[in-house]
């Protein structure tokens, strides 16, 4: 059964069911009505994170012939309008840094902790036996 959804980029309503087997549509259609909206959202997100500059946003807008920013949701519209302002100086783009994962040493049990646990277990079992006169 198709569910009526609303695109987070343009606000258009469309039908999509992620559970229907007959639907051969991609999973990203849960959020976006089409591939253009998905790509635009990715471009706007990259611009907000300072991974790309205004020139790349402007190139995307020109390539996809996007002229009416009013048809997009408020957050997307604000970024598009800010990026289309050619009078402002271009912002620096953050450089990607390679992050290496630090794998911690495995935690080993210390012998004295294990002995303490066994001692506590023996004490509690002795208390239970005394309590029940076993």
Image (spheres, rainbow, N blue to C red):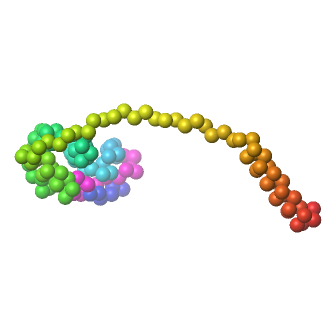
Q: Which residue sits at x=14%, y=47%?
A: 83
**81 on left or right of 16:** left
Direction right: furthest residue: 133
Q: Could you tell me residue 128's position as x and y percent?
A: 85, 62
Q: Which residue sits at x=30%, y=35%?
A: 96
Q: How many marks?
A: 0
Direction left: furthest residue: 87
Judge whether residue 41 can be spotted in this image. no
Q: Could you tell me residue 64's position as x and y percent?
A: 13, 41
Q: Which residue sits at x=89%, y=66%?
A: 132
**84 on left or right of 33:** left
Direction front: furthest residue: 112
Q: Could you tell me residue 48's position as x and y percent?
A: 24, 47
User: Which portion, as a residue range, is magenta?
Assistant: 7-22
Residue 42: which quarter of the image? Answer: top left
Question: Residue 35, relative to residue 17: is it above or below?
Answer: above
Between residue 22 and residue 9, name the one nearer to us. 9
Q: Which residue sits at x=83%, y=57%?
A: 123
Quadrant of the rendering where the C terminus is positioned: bottom right
Between residue 63 and residue 59, name the one nearer to us. 59
Quadrant of the rendering where the N terminus is positioned: bottom left
**43 on left or right of 108:** left
Between residue 31 and residue 96, name the one nearer to us. 96
Residue 71: which quarter of the image? Answer: bottom left
């Amino acid at each position: 059964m198709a569910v009526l959804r609303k695109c987070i980029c343009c606000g258009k309503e469309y039908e999509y069911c992620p559970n229907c087997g007959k639907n051969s549509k991609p999973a990203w259609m849960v959020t976006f009505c089409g591939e253009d909206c998905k790509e635009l959202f990715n471009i706007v997100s990259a611009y907000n994170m300072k991974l790309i500059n205004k020139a790349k946003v402007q190139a995307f807008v020109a390539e996809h012939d996007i002229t009416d920013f009013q048809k997009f949701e408020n957050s997307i519209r604000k970024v598009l309008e800010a990026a289309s302002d050619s009078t402002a100086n271009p912002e620096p783009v953050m450089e990607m840094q390679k992050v290496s994962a630090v794998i911690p040493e495995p935690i080993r049990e210390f012998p004295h902790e294990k002995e303490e646990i066994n001692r506590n277990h023996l004490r509690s079992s002795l208390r239970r036996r005394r309590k029940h006169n076993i």
